[in-house]
Amino acid sequence: MSEPRPDPLDHPDPFRAGEAAATETLLRAYVRETETPVPPAGEELVLGFPASGLRLSVPVRYRSATGWHRFGEPRVVSEPAGAALVAAAAMRESVVRRRLPHHLGSDAVARVLDSARRTGTHLARRRAEGGSGAIPFLEAEQALLLGHPFHPAPKSRQEASDGELDAYSPELRGSFRLHWFAADPAIVVGECADGRAPAELLRDIAAGLELPAGMVPVPAHPWQAREVLGRPEVASLVEAGLLRPLGAAGPAWHPTSSVRTVHRADADVMLKLSLGMRITNSRRNNLRGELRLGVRAARLLGAGPGEWLRAEHPEFGILRDFAWVSAGADGPETGLETAIRDNPFRGGPNDGQGDGQCVAGLLAERTGPGDGTPPRHRALLSAATARAARAHGVSLAEASARWLTRYLEVLAVPLIRLQSRYGIALEPHHQNTLVALDGDGLPRAGWYRDSQGYYVAASRAGELERLLPELADGLELVFDDDLVDERVAYYLGVNNLLGLVGAFGALGLADEGDLLRVLRAALERLRAAEPGAKGLLDLLLDAPLLRCKGNFLTCVDGRDELVGDVRTQSVYIDLPNPLTEVPR
């Protein structure tokens, strides 16, 4: 049997490696969303693009039961096909099939190429460094060098310069000082779950800032601070003397994996800053409805469900976006909206307090050191699983099964039981979930974060309104049970749990079929114990197709996923459910 070809991710040229990563991710998303069969590893995937008259031959390095395929370098006839050609063909094919305006395809291609270039920059910088010394929390937040494994343009940030992105990018270990505004109290809006004025919370964060007498500090991302001054509603406040730009001040904050949320190891809170820069599909402007939702959710949890969750699952927690603040009349957004989030991840790299790690960062693939060889561990998950195998004297495959089992206990089971008990459902995709690992490398605690992802099942809204009478006043929070189950089946089932199984397989740690059996058995036990979760678990265990967000098609459509009705913000597709193939 011939030796496998070197992994394109490990190419000595970081920009060739970055382009390989962009091409592979694009193809992975494309075959998933076009229902294209992928042949076994070692064979060639042949893709025809009739709209372009193009035919690609793609080596299959690994075929995944859950879609986390690995591909080699595509070729046209006998020549390599780079990201530009593959993106142009795939986008044109989708634009023609869906009868979309052609400029949408051009825009999507531009984002793919921008993402590929950014990825190359990330790899070049990371290969040249000697290590970060960051706490585990930040190390995982900064680990997503290649981006979302099923998004065609995960690192696209077209509107910022290279110099700006040095400071703003977690992948480059950036940090920056907040830009501050002084606002007249009459134009400061916001709320806090415990009734405190948000300005009171900000005064601690802004300690040392020289404020004009009687004014309130309002923070902003430095990129956003420049951009909002061109908005008429902000310019008029400045002209009237009600809002004064003060510039950068205070200690440096570190961007996390979302880019707009920032962290300091010595701060009691994290800040989710508004950022109108287009990142992947969306401009990351904080919407006041989302911020109010975060505070309402914090109040709802504080009315009883949070106490139940702590008692039943002390190893699991929800990071609340418990307050927000902005400058401007109580109406449309001004771009200065900031959410204030819990921060349990404080202290130094070795004191055990900063060890919650973003799951997306744990699974993120790494490239080789730059000499053409692979990395010692392809991902942080690979290192953790190897540690568990050594500690317990078992194989990597068995350590993977134990890792998955513990992960379900500290993260998935609490989330499903919260929905079963109270009808409160969340959007726990990989970037929104965190775990802490014990000394053996196995999960010991889990967290959920993000105020955007809350749902209340309509059948349970009445009992929750008795706990919190203003539950849904003025907010889109209550949804039909079927929609809630469908979305959780995607975020928790497809994206998180099946994605984790796929990552174990693609990283060469375990057989996906074995892990799918572990997952199915655990979910069947939970279904027997939690009648309130029957609708969700019936979907995950028995539905032949699961609804799945189509990041490729959403990108081609040019949709901003943060704008519009929750039912139509993204394109959804039907995905074959691999759990139904597991022997009962």
Image (tube, rainbow, N blue to C red):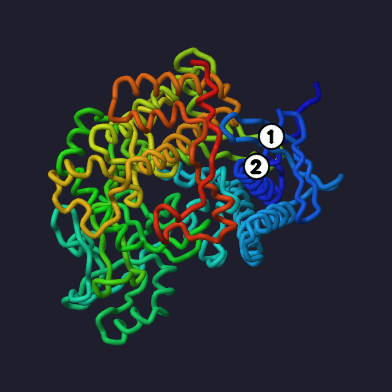
Q: Position of residue 335 (x, y in %)?
A: 36, 69
| Residue 469 on image: x %, y % | 13, 50
**Res 136 seen here:** no
First in sequence, mark 2 or 1: give its number.
2
Q: Is residue 413 left or right of residue 581?
A: left
Q: Secondary structure at mark 2?
A: helix
82 vs 494: above or below: below
Q: Is residue 379 above or below residue 47?
A: above
Which residue appears at 64% of the width and 49% of the height? 22
Q: Is residue 545 above or below residue 262?
A: above
Q: Amino acid at mark 2?
A: Val
Q: Residue at label 1?
A: 38
Q: Secondary structure at mark 1?
A: loop
Question: Quarter of the image holding residue 456?
Answer: top left
Query: Mark 2 touching mark 1, by CB under 8 A?
Result: yes
Nearest the eye: 111 or 387: 111
Q: Position of residue 554 (x, y in %)?
A: 54, 54
Residue at (32, 30) in percent of width and height: 533
The amino acid type, in three-letter code, at marker 1 is: Val
Q: How many marks?
A: 2
Label 2 and label 1: CA atoms lie apart by 8 Å
Quadrant hosting residue 149? top right
Q: Which mark is residue 31?
A: 2
In front: 486, or 349? 486
Residue 47, visible in the rendered structure: yes
